[in-house]
Amino acid sequence: MVITKNNVTPWLVEGIVDYEKLIEEFGVKHLSEDNLKFLKDLSAKKNIPFHLFLKRNLYFSHRDFDKVIESFKKNENIFLYTGRSPGGSMHIGHLVSFLFTKYLQDVFDCNLYIQIPDDEKFLFKKDLNLETIEEMTQKDLLNIAAIGFNPDKTFIFRNSEYIRNMYPLYLKTAKKILLSQTSAIFGFNNQSNIGMINYPALQIVPTFFEKGQCLIPCAIDQDPYFRLQRDIANSLGYKKNSTILSKFIPPLTGTEGKMSATNANKAILLDDCAKEIKNKINKYAFSGGQPTIEEHRKLGGNTKIDVCYQWLYYLFEEDDKAIEKIKNDYEKGILLTGELKKILIDKLTLFIENHQKNKQKVIDENLLEKYMYKGKLAIKMWNEKFL
Amino acid sequence: MVITKNNVTPWLVEGIVDYEKLIEEFGVKHLSEDNLKFLKDLSAKKNIPFHLFLKRNLYFSHRDFDKVIESFKKNENIFLYTGRSPGGSMHIGHLVSFLFTKYLQDVFDCNLYIQIPDDEKFLFKKDLNLETIEEMTQKDLLNIAAIGFNPDKTFIFRNSEYIRNMYPLYLKTAKKILLSQTSAIFGFNNQSNIGMINYPALQIVPTFFEKGQCLIPCAIDQDPYFRLQRDIANSLGYKKNSTILSKFIPPLTGTEGKMSATNANKAILLDDCAKEIKNKINKYAFSGGQPTIEEHRKLGGNTKIDVCYQWLYYLFEEDDKAIEKIKNDYEKGILLTGELKKILIDKLTLFIENHQKNKQKVIDENLLEKYMYKGKLAIKMWNEKFL
């Protein structure tokens, strides 16, 4: 596949990311003070804490989030859509959009559709067969269900299974998209297989599951798919989707690009035990500290490139004063790298242990069946014909 | 869509067809004496008349029919595959491949898959919606079921419905086909929608419904789809398909191109009544006769361009001596155009009335349900997963 400018496509992110440039190039907007105030007020009204990811500017930009606010104020229908390509080994970065999606579902009290594009994975990965992808899917489903979405307002579906219902909607969507459009956006060429070329239609389909305003929380590199939706939505009688876009969480080994699970040793996986977490952080977490304690005490650490600090800032340290103190202490050399790592290890271990408990609850209470087949929304969706 | 050389693509046939040139260009072979002898002997063994379409060279060429014979002799699995894009108004020409397919099913006593690509129709026809196509489909299904296939060895399926089972097989197929391949064969370009580009995978899928030798009876213009199958079959663990290819039945109004139902007034439809048949033949059947009776008696008629003669020769006059006599009498001016038309009208009326009785039987005995859902093969197919 041809990689577009800036090396940001839905399938590859590399190099240091210049977010201002991305915002300009993608034609999206920063979340405004008004946008944030709306979410803050709504959270307060619902007695839900204003989300850390907003407070710390991890979700930082959007396309037409104002339309979501407008719909909400008019009491019109809003729904959420997200997804995950099966991978089997989910790491901490994979949870970001799911955690934020849960927050949005809670504040908007709305339906949520979670697509598992097992078909996309198969079409785009030369060496993966359907059996392997099915195993990966089963693992991922547990992790996703562990987030604790509303079981009666959430529908989790695998494309390969839900195709039976959504096929007519796929046909209507695919008929509207020209080869020139997908090639331009995704860089397909003559050596792309025809399933890949066709696939963007299937990722757009869930934005048409309801007639209301669809909001998609995702990392900014996923934006192209949903721009394409905006070109065709009106002609099919639907609204253009809105997106709320995040930065990338830096990988354990450095602040460039985004996290990957392809090297499991160097990422914190959701099924890591406390010992593994500790070892990985101590061994691989890219540090902004100085080579020796003496130098660190004298020069201080660089929080801008320190992964432990970044993770605490974006993901784990809710307390504004506490994170401010960590920053100051680290930059002044009062806090050593080992001590900073210890803070992250403790927070991270707690988080992962809690996630694993939630996963066990999903198994014990057979919650996946609710999300996929037996919940209120799931039942409705399995009766939809989309003709 | 770009039209390929000779103006023969699966979607458009026009101009006088040079079959020898097509055979050469497509790289197919004439049915050999040995091929025909095999089918003749097999028919005799099964007590089934050797088919008129073979006797009269309407099915005239093939690709790898020898492999079918080889498989049969080794007692290996053979299965048939055909289909019809929904149109709603089937005419006499549309039945040709179904009638011949029934003959092949009878002599080989094998499974038959009939694909109704309602999805293809929708993707390729800008102005058709799914509802209209559904109505067309329902009409066509009755006509197809009226042919009298073996209800326990025939599976008729609409793509939009059977997609639920065949999706994994579609994915495997689409993954093997490059954009360059479909573009070269079908003339897709940047203005083609991505569903169209993807569609060839779905037409290939049924050739992988069984592990045996797939034989496809079709008109020669359908060949490109199945050539593509041959490029990818082995890599997916299946056999290359074989085709047995027919010429086109000339349309009522002349011997150029193939029949079309778009002008219903000028085609014999399967639900025409006796009076309509008589009127249409008398009014529109392109004649090889002379302008006046006097000239006709003197110069005789031209059977090469006379549609009534051609239809009798290829479709309705089984008796070799009778057709020979008609030819001689017409060419000598003994038989007048009106008399020739009368012979065809009688045969055609009988055929259509018989077809309509068979259709009524399909309704009365709920046979469609057997072909689509409840027959032995249908039940098996609805349990298939193709993983």
Image: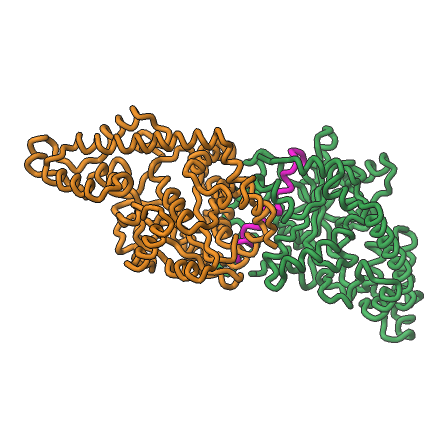
Chain colours: A orange, B green
Does the magenta-highlighted stretch encompass residue B211?
A: yes
The quarter of the picture where the C terminus of chain B appears is top right
The quarter of the picture where the N terminus of chain B appears is bottom right
| Residue B173 appears anywhere in the view | no
Rendering coords of residue B125 (x, y %): 61, 60
Q: Quadrant of residue B14?
A: bottom right
B17 on left or right of B278: left
Q: Quadrant of residue B85?
A: bottom right
Residue sitting at the far top: A275
In magenta, the rendered stretch is B193-213
Report the front residue among B243 and B365: B365
Type of secondary structure dominating the magenta stretch: helix
| Residue A281 appears anywhere in the view | yes
Position of A238 relative to A373 (above/below): below
Position of A242 relative to A51 (above/below): below
B9 on left or right of B311: left
Position of B28 relative to A184 (above/below): above
At a point 51% along the width and 48% down the height, the residue shown is: A194
Position of A370 relative to A43 (above/below): above
Rendering coords of residue A43 (x, y %): 35, 50
Rendering coords of residue A117 (x, y %): 48, 43
At a point 60% along the width and 36% down the height, the residue shown is: B386
